[in-house]
Amino acid sequence: MEVVNALGRRKSAVARVYVSEGKGKITINNRELNDYFPTGILQYVVLQPLNLLGVAGQYDINVNLDGGGITGQAEALRLGITRALMEINPESRPALKAAGFVTRDPREVERKKPGQPKARKRFQFSKR
């Protein structure tokens, strides 16, 4: 099997995922998964598609992550891994779609408007 690459995005985070056959090693920006995502919740989010299909120890995954915060990066990585797994095995798509991993979350940060402190917040109104 050759290397399969996929792209995952969430908010402003971009994950370029390269999947090849191996022993289950996940490398993110030349660091281990446990080192890059220290909390168990984020590690769980990243491993969700692999655990769902039961292929957690079959593929080596190399990732370039850029932009965003750690939560957005973890969810971008989950989408990238999901897309790569679907490219490897198209029959896995219904299970991944039922779990909600195939859909890209379209929510982005709303821009700040001029004359306001934030995107929606207004300065206090004074009638007199």
Image: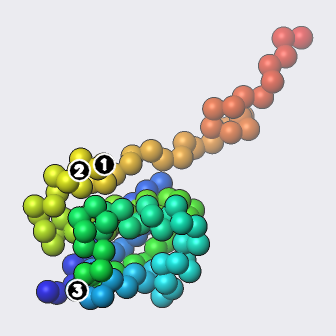
Q: Secondary structure at mark 1?
A: loop
Q: Which mark is residue 21?
A: 3
Label 1 is placed on what type of residue?
A: Gly
Q: Are marks 2 and 3 in contact (CB under 8 Å)?
A: no
What count of labels does the image hold?
3
Q: Which residue is mark 1?
A: 100
Q: Are marks 2 and 1 in contact (CB under 8 Å)?
A: yes
Q: Using the rendered view, name the quadrant where residue 45 is placed.
A: bottom left
Label 3 is placed on what type of residue?
A: Glu
The tag earlier along the polypeptide, 3 or 1, is 3
Residue farthest to the right, as pictured: 128
Residue beneath the point at 48% across and 68% down: 43
Crowding near the residue tagged with mark 1, few <14, some 14–19, many ≥20 C-alpha atoms within 10 Å: few
Label 2 is placed on what type of residue?
A: Lys
Measured Cα–Cα span from mark 2 to mark 3: 23 Å
Q: Which residue is mark 2?
A: 97
Relative height, residue 105 to residue 40 (above, below)? above
Residue beneath the point at 25% across and 68% down: 54
